[in-house]
Amino acid sequence: MAEETATRTALVTGGNRGIGFEACRQLARLGLRVVLTAREPERGEEAAGALRGEGLAVSFEEVDVGDGGSVEACARRLSEAGIEVDVLVNNAGVYPTEGVFSVDEETFRRALEINTLGPFRTCRAFVPAMVRRGYGRVVNVSSGGGSFGEGIGPVAYGASKAAQNALTVKVAGAVRGDVKANAMCPGWVRTEMGGSGAPRSPEQAADTLVWLATLPADGPNGGFFRDRQPIPW
């Protein structure tokens, strides 16, 4: 695996903590060069520095996926530096829990801005170049809370993740060559978002993410997975 990934670069949104941080660690351990992104520079630089302290090839870029200009500026900086993104992990997200009639429009809009439009912006910025080069992997960190088959979660969160799932299917259908786009559900994880009582560790959650990020050429495209197994849309 290390020989296959040594020349690849992965960009992870929301990489400064939780699942994103662990994904950066695991991808870098496999030999990928990792671009850890976060919207808060101090926290992002600190996280990237911690991983570099483990001897891993991790750099930091400031990205706010809720701001299209921020995503485009990052893409320009990387392009000017000669860095090609081969693996895109859309991990940044928010988790509003208000009910159908108690959630306000701004909260709902923010969920869509981050959880749905964020991945759309990064895919638009990085996937066309993957197609031109003939290789790419996109992993959208979704949730069973966005699955009609498992039961939609809290309204703003569930709707935004269901829309992210739809985006995954459309991106998967629009690519060609050895480019794949898949969604995954990490489960309930012990992170700042999931809380200390969650049953799964970030290491467990990142396993399926890393698997999808390093799929072989005959791997799936346009699927939704948990623990490396398909789950219903």
Image (cartoon, rainbow, N blue to C red):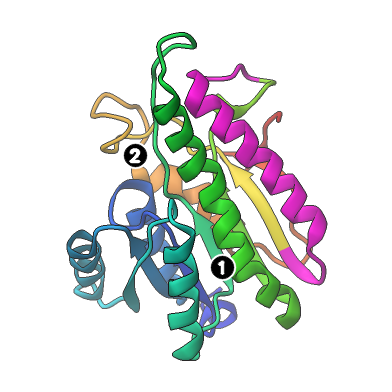
The secondary structure making up most of the magenta span is helix
The residue singled out by tag 2 in the image is 201
Residue at the image point whose x is 44% and y is 90% from the top: 81
- State the SS at label 1: strand
- The N terminus lies in which quarter of the figure? bottom right
The residue singled out by tag 1 in the image is 87
Residue at the image point whose x is 73% and y is 67% from the top: 179
- State the SS at label 2: loop
Q: Is residue 176 above or below residue 163?
A: below
Determine if the magenta segment contains residue 156. Answer: yes
Q: Is residue 220 visible?
A: no
Residue furthest out toward the front? 105
Q: Give, as a single range, the part of the protein colored magenta.
A: 150-179
C-alpha span from label 1 to label 2:
23 Å
| Percent coordinates x, y for residue 145 in the rendering | 54, 25
Q: Residues within 10 Å of mark 2 (few under 14, many from 20)?
A: some
Residue at the image point whose x is 48% and y is 28% from the top: 157
Residue at the image point whose x is 70% and y is 72% from the top: 128
Q: Is residue 73 left or right of residue 150?
A: left
Q: Is residue 65 visible?
A: yes
In the image, 72 versus 84, the foreground residue is: 72
